[in-house]
Amino acid sequence: MLDSPMSDLQTLCTAAKAWPFEQARMVVERLKKAPKDTVIFETGYGPSGLPHIGTFQEVARTTMVRHAFRCLTGDQIKTRLIAFSDDMDGFRKVPSNLPNQEMLAEHLHLPLTKVPDPFGCCESFAHHNNAKLREFLDGFGFEYEFMSSTEQYKSGAFDQTLLTMLDRYDQVMAIMLPTLGEERRATYSPFLPISPKTGRVLQVPTLARNFERGTITFEDEDGAKTEVPVTGGHVKIQWKPDWALRWTALGVDYEMAGKDLIDSVQQSSKICRALGGNPPEGFNYELFLDEHGQKISKSKGNGLTIDEWLTYAPPESLAYYIYGKPKTAKKLYFDVIPKAVDEYISFIDAYQKQNEAERLENAVWHIHSGNPPSNVTPISFALLMNLASASNAETKEQLWAFIRKYAPGASPETHPFLDKLTGYALRYFNDFVKPTKVFRAATEKERAAFEDLIRRFDALPADITDGEAIQNEVYAVGKEHGFEPLRDWFKALYEVLFGVESGPRFGQFAAIFGVRETSALLRKGLAGELLKAA
């Protein structure tokens, strides 16, 4: 099928430089060497803490690679995306951001699917975290198959590969032992038996192996020598061999991983080959950092959660932020949200004017699987927050009163994205912008410029909505009053009127808010009323 004549889109895709195409072409080359009917894309998730955006980004980015692969191959080859939860792993540490800390501490070392849910709503802690992950993935419309480690081990799906690992135990140990410290080497085994007496996942040496019976022998917590099968969910495999087990048993063709897992990928790939498998293609992405430049951690609860981002911005903006420069470390905290939203909107607007080749390089093509929406909003996120500030609006309806004057045909029904955006903007403004506003009085030079701008605005038609024409008046005032550089003039407007140092184009703000209303705002700024109100 890979040798079939290419469509025009396929031809463009082969030359596209966007990173999802670069990754997808690696999978195409893999198939040329080892053809198969279905290509398996996988993402992994450790449900030992609440899901965070670092978890979501793997599914989002892998989905982008999967779609690029489909376009490169003309969608002639079946694909699956498996979201795999390592929920049979032992519960080793109680995350500090969870309730019921004492209760959780009593269940350390049990498989995560056996740890009670601290929130009291699900069958186990793992079930709760898995549900939170799936809830978001489903809400965004991802096409994926959720797979549970516990179910795979217990159902027998991994049995054949587990027996192969038992048979090739010495090869696996030869790969792993040189990577471990002296103390760890003395007790290491790829097999972690689950105690028949306590149910805990034990990190203990393997004392004996019996391939004919498919068993290992170990010393249980009470000191008794115990024999268990390696099949049927009686053991859990250590992290790096477990990754290799999964790749081999499921036939995974593509999986990306964080930069901190480079060594794990290398060792797991060696073990995968030892088991007779072919390690997947992929790349190591840079990690998200919190506002202090520290790696985001599930146990620490630093950085943003999925729910926090979605409280203040649409999911499309999160996908946009995740798309860009995956091999560059990026900070992920509340301050990045407004810029991500408005850049997403600008890429949507640009898409309509681009040719097919240019569109393949546009982030929104990858975010929306080749079918981005059009005309999502005529007003930016930053402008909506300025509108909320100037009007003291507390509800979406109050903002829509201004929006309708600026865009008479717009409504929540015709512009549902904009309607949602008004709600996000109000929440973000009230929680993050309003508490940090610092108003100041105008200087004498600024006062004269403000008075000039008021006169010019008062001379404009009251119903003018031409943001560029209004912006030209603002520019003219700044130049005539000797502001050098001119950005100092706009900085003055924003500091006196909004209590912030910068913002979107002032002309468009005045067009939406109304030139008469903006004149009144300028007068309040000159009179010191905004400073007093703060």
Image: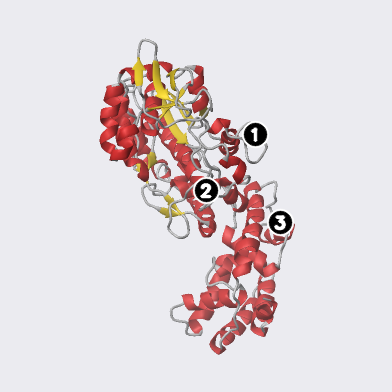
Q: Relative to 169, is 141 above or below?
A: below
Image quadrant in which the C terminus is located: bottom right
Label 3 residue SS: helix
Residue that numbered label 1 is attached to: 122
Q: Are marks 2 and 1 in contact (CB under 8 Å)?
A: no
Q: Relative to 234, is 9 above or below?
A: below
Q: Amino acid at mark 2?
A: Leu
Residue 382, by quadrant, is bottom right
Residue that numbered label 2 is attached to: 318
Task: Look at the image and tell me whether residue 525 can be seen.
Answer: yes
Residue 429 in the image: state x and y as whole percent: 63, 62
Q: Amino acid at mark 3?
A: Lys
Q: Residue furthest front?
A: 223
Residue 315 in the image: state x and y as whole percent: 56, 46
Task: Look at the image and tell me whether residue 38 can be seen.
Answer: no
Question: For this rendering, which residue is in front, 196 or 44?
Answer: 196
Q: Which mark is residue 396?
A: 3
